[in-house]
Amino acid sequence: MDFKTEFVPLTIQPQEIEDKSFQIITEELGEHSFSDDQYRVVQRVIHASADFELGRSLVFHPQAMEAGITAIRNGENIVADVQMVQVGISKDRLRKYGGDVHVYISDPDVMEEAKRLNTTRAIVSMRKALKETSGGIYAIGNAPTALLELIRLVKGGYAKPSLIIGMPVGFVSAAESKDELRKLDIPFITNIGRKGGSTVVVAAVNALSLLADKRG
Amino acid sequence: MDFKTEFVPLTIQPQEIEDKSFQIITEELGEHSFSDDQYRVVQRVIHASADFELGRSLVFHPQAMEAGITAIRNGENIVADVQMVQVGISKDRLRKYGGDVHVYISDPDVMEEAKRLNTTRAIVSMRKALKETSGGIYAIGNAPTALLELIRLVKGGYAKPSLIIGMPVGFVSAAESKDELRKLDIPFITNIGRKGGSTVVVAAVNALSLLADKRG
């Protein structure tokens, strides 16, 4: 095959594409009341979804940004609800501070326990995470049941995450789980409504680790 | 920790949640002109994004559904542009027919070659995929440059995928790459506009493999 020989070099580099994208987002979003740090998250969420409605629907607990940045700089781990979130998160910036990303939903013991209890793997994976993680950032993009279980454990005094990023997507329980999250007085980043998903949660975590890294 | 003892069994099971979600989607979407098979893809895309606008923007080449289902049943491989797509796709139904999901973007030789050519890893990964895969379904959710390169290779006669699922998200080149894809006369599934992403491409592939499996 000789298709390589026809190769036309890129006229626009990845960093330029990102810069241009962020410029378009800032122009089209217009006025907003997010802080500068919060806006970094909003911008990356819109970048990952091309959805301004979703970006505008983000809600931040007043301590969320500081708590997330501090957790990353302290090398706390990130718990992802599903593997798509786990693989999407940039690991290099976390590992620099000693942190990593863990996901428990496909662990054999989690699968067995879920079967035994007739419940979801997502729920059991949150309980396992709690045993393995102190503090930590919980990044939930897929499973409302994971988020609801985590909220229940926080309310019961069993869990004290440094930050919960809860943006599960869906038509049953997703919006409701986020409504419950917004009632907690612990650091959270979430959004209002049905939208969300793994890619936007990944975007939020990556925005946080970039901010953490900038503090130098 | 005694949080397990407080466990309240689920009142709604995952399958019920999915059924209820699909019912809501069908009700809220209302009239449409998708075929029954196409609608399975649309439904799962909306389920994964909670975005009716995105669902309605899907465009199918007339042979897309048949080509995709046949490719899966023939055990052809799926090439993902990024790892998030790779991990999200349900493998069991593919492996039943001898197929699997491959992703090349983080291969050391791809990274090296991209550096040498001053181009994106996404582009080089498509060239590697072409050498390793005959036919196949290309599932592109993230990188417009991967989709543009694949289109270039198809036009040049170097590539003949069985199906291209191209729904990269973004503000620079994403919509344009999909406009180019819709001009090809080979089977494709895409959408109009900036939206898309790994989760919706995964949803489309999983819808296809469910249809393939139903043929029994």
Image: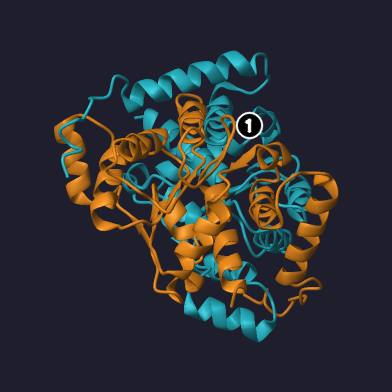
Chain colours: A orange, B cyan
Residue under the image location 77 percent in, 74 percent down: A10
**Relative vertical location of residue B200 with respect to residue A77 in this rendering, above or below:** above
Residues A111 and A215: in front is A215
| Secondary element at tag 1 | loop
Q: Residue at x 28, y 34 (%)?
A: A120
A128 horizontally vs B66: left or right = left
In percent of width and height, residue B89 lies at 43, 47
Is B8 situated left or right of A211 in this image? left
What residue is drawn where x is 67% and y is 49%?
A42
Regarding residue A170, the answer to whether it shows in the image is: yes
- The residue most toward the bottom is B116
Q: Is residue A19 above or below residue A53?
A: below
Image quadrant where one finds the N terminus of chain A: bottom right
**Residue B80 can be seen in this image:** no
Dot 1 surroundings within 10 Å: few (below 14), some, or many (20 or more)?
A: many
Residue at x-position 65% and y-position 37%: A57
Q: Quadrant of residue B19?
A: top left
Q: Nearer the viewer, residue B72 or A76?
A: A76
The picture places residue A109, in percent across and down from the top left corner, at 17, 48
Identify which residue, B204 or A105, lies in the foreground: A105
Residue under label 1: B51
Report the amino acid beneath label 1: Asp
Q: Give the letter of the chain under mark 1.
A: B
Instruction: Give the camera-side residue of A36 and A198.
Output: A36
Q: How many marks?
A: 1
Q: Quadrant of the C terminus of chain A?
A: bottom right
In which quadrant of the rendered view does residue B56 lie?
top right
